[in-house]
Image (spheres, rainbow, N blue to C red):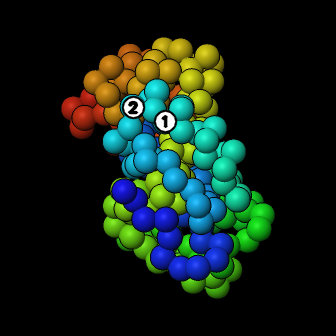
Amino acid sequence: MLSLQLVEGLEAGTDEAGRGCLAGPVTAAAVILPADFDVPLLNDSKKLSEKQRQFLRPIIEDQAIAYAVAHCSPKEVDTINILNASIKAMHRALEKLDPCPNHILVDGNRFHSFKKIPHQCIIKGDGKFQNIAAASVLAKTYRDDLMIDLDLKYPKYNWKNNKGYPTKKHREAILKEGISPQHRKTFRLLSEQFQIKF
């Protein structure tokens, strides 16, 4: 059973999805849950099936006090690096919350202070706290939906299935087709022996 929160009041959990992808944005969500929130299935989104995540998403959205999702583009990832882009996406999600939280739980071990609101970084927090787990589910499902939409524009990379992650077929498509505007140019898109067509 995941813990609900660390402090009393409006505590937001925040997490990101897509950090290790070769293409597409990094997406973050922030969620404030009520004190009586109780959904035993909720867990780290990586431990859930796609069907379970899609089942949980409307429950989270319906029962949350507040939730928000935000993105950092591939260009931003290339400009400020993936860590800073992940944190920036979290800040954008937190900025959208209404009401504003009085405490923030962050998945992972790195964060930049947001509006001087106290925060705590929790390693593997998406498997320990419900508000972070809820954020991980929203970030993952919203990003997956976005990658499925982008697949319609760039079908050769099979993003509807790989969601931009570095699968063998994705790398083979990059080798054959070159990169798209959605690819992160600062990432190692191919093994060093391959030449990327820019």
Q: 17 or 1, which lies in front?
A: 1
Q: Residue at x 43, y 47 (%)?
A: 40
What is the number of the mark on residue 53? 1
Q: 147 or 47, which lies in front?
A: 47
Q: Position of residue 67 (x, y in %)?
A: 67, 54
Report crowding for label 2: few under 14, some 14 to 19, many 20 or more residues within 10 A (C-alpha): few
What is the number of the mark on residue 49? 2
- Amino acid at pointer 2: Ser
User: Which residue is outermost to the left?
Assistant: 193
Q: Is residue 186 visible?
A: no
Q: 68 or 197, which lies in front?
A: 68
Q: Residue at x 32, y 28 (%)?
A: 167
Task: Tell me the CA gap for discs 1 and 2.
Answer: 6 Å
> Split into 4 quadrants, where in the image is the N terminus?
bottom left
The image shows residue 172, relative to residue 23, as above or below, that is: above
The image shows residue 15, relative to residue 73, as above or below, that is: below
**Quadrant of the image occupied by residue 124:** bottom left
Secondary structure beneath label 2 = loop
**Quadrant of the image occupied by residue 22:** top left
- Amino acid at pointer 1: Arg
Secondary structure beneath label 1 = helix
